[in-house]
Amino acid sequence: MNNALRNRACTGTALALAVSTVLTACGGGDSASSDTRTAKDSPSARSAATVKDPLVATFDGGLYILDGESLKLTRTLALPGFNRVNPAGDDSHVIVSTDAGFRVLDAAEQNLTDITYEGSKPGHVVRHAGRTVLFTDGTGEVNVIDPADLSGGTKPEGRTYHSTEAHHGVAVELSNGELLSALGTEEKRTGALVLDKNNKEIKRDERCPGVHGEAAAQGEAVGVGCEDGVLIYKNGEFTKVDAPDDYGRIGNQAGSDASPILLGDYKTDPDAELERPTRISLIDTETAKLRLVDLGTSYSFRSLGRGPHGEALVLGTDGALHVIDPKTGTVEKKIPVVDTWQEPLDWQQARPTLFVRDHTAYVSEPGKRTVHAVDIESGEKITSVTLPKGTNELSGVAGH
C-alpha cells in the first residue's frame, strides 16, 4: 500500500474548501454498475459492509459513495434536487445540503440517516476545534454540533443561534466556546460579530463588505473574506487586512493548523459576469500582510485546498495541481492531474473539484466521469475510477 494512503487514515484534520453554494450535478452516461446498490425509498436502508474513509460525490439525481483507498464505487443513493457535500467532522458522516435543509449521511455505513436540520438555502458547513457549524441562509439559523454525537443515529443536542436577519452567512465556534458569525441582511453583508458561550455579543466589526467564507489558521486565527481584503479574529480582537485594490474580493479561503497563512482567491472586477482570476492571495495572520501570487492559470471556487504540512494547493484550469509554499509564495511543483478545462459561466454547473485528506488530493474530472487520487508529496497518481455519470461536488469523511 502507498505510504500516503496508509498515513491518510490517521489524520486529525480534514482540509477542504468550505465553499458554501448549493450546486447542481451534471453528467450523463449509463445507469449504475451492476455491483452498486441503490436506496431510493428507505433513508434508513443499511449496506452490507462498512466503507473505510469513504468519499462522496454528487451527480444529477443522487450520491456516489466510493471506497477511500481503491476509489471503487460501493453504493449509489438516489437523492433528487441540488445537493452538495461536506465532511461532518468524524470518520463516518458527511453533511448533505439539500433543497429542504441539511441531511446527515452515514457514508461509512452507506445510508442517509434520519438526522436533518430543516431550513431553506442550507449554506456553509464549518469544522473547527471538534465542533461542526451549520449556517442556514434562508433562516439565519446557526446550529453547532459535536460530530461524535452523530454516531447514535439521533439528532444531537447542540447550540443554536438565530441571526438578527437571514442572509448568506457563515459561522465558526472557537475552542473557548466563542461563536463568530457573519453580519448582514439579504441585501447587504457588512462584517462579523462574536458571541460568548451564552450567545451574548462581545465583539463586532463591520469593516468587511460582502463578507463571505471563512478559514482558520495556526493559532486559531479566523479569517473571513471581504470585497476589500480579509477580516481576522485572533486573541479576542479583530484586525482588517486591506486588499491592494479598491475592489479586491476574497470570497473563498482554505486554512491549516500547520500554517499561520491563509490561502484565498482574489477577484478585482465587480462587474464581471464571471471573473476567471489567475492570482491567489496568501494572508499572513501573524503579520496581517497580504501577498498576491500569479499562477499563470485560472481556477474556480472549488480549486483551493491545503496539504498535510500546510502547503497551499490550487487546482488550475491548466489541469495541474499547483503546490505552493505559503511563506514565500513559490510554486514548488505542478502535478498534472486532469485535462485543461474552463470554469463554466453558471456557478451551479460541474467543473473539476479538489478535496484533500491528509497526504492525498482527490480530484474529479466530470467530463470524463472520473475521480483521481494523487499523492501530494510524491506527485504520483495513485489510482483513478470511472463512474456511471459525471460528478459535481466531491467530498468525504474527515478521517481518523
Image (cartoon, rainbow, N blue to C red):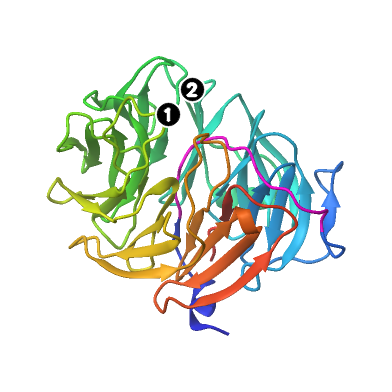
Q: Position of residue 279 (x, y in %)?
A: 27, 48
> Which span of residues is magenta-colored?
16-32
Q: Position of residue 217 (x, y in %)?
A: 29, 52
Say which residue appears at 60% left-offset and 74% top-offset.
Answer: 383
Q: Quadrant of residue 95?
A: top right
What's the magenta bit mostly, secondary-structure-wise? Answer: loop
Q: In which quadrant is the N terminus drawn?
A: bottom right
The residue that label 1 is drawn on is 169
C-beta proximity under 8 Å, tags 2 and 1: yes
- Number of other residues with Cα within 10 Å of mark 1, as a class: few under 14, some 14 to 19, many 20 or more: many
> Measured along the vertical axis of the image, is residue 209 above or below residue 353?
above
The residue that label 2 is drawn on is 140
| Nearer to us in this view, 256 or 400 | 256
- Number of other residues with Cα within 10 Å of mark 2, as a class: few under 14, some 14 to 19, many 20 or more: many
Q: Position of residue 325 (x, y in %)?
A: 25, 65
In front: label 2 or label 1: 1
Q: Earlier in the sequence, mark 2 or mark 1?
A: 2
Which secondary structure, mark 2?
loop
Residue 329 appears in view: yes
Magenta stretch encompasses residue 92: no
Please, what is the three-letter code of the amino acid marked with disc 1? Gly
Q: Position of residue 143 (x, y in %)?
A: 52, 33
> Measured along the vertical axis of the image, is residue 173 above or below residue 325?
above
Which secondary structure, mark 1?
loop
Image-based side of 347 in relation to 295, left or right: right
Magenta stretch encompasses residue 25: yes
Please, what is the three-letter code of the amino acid marked with disc 2? Gly
Q: Quadrant of residue 188?
A: top left
| Nearer to us in this view, 158 or 182 | 182
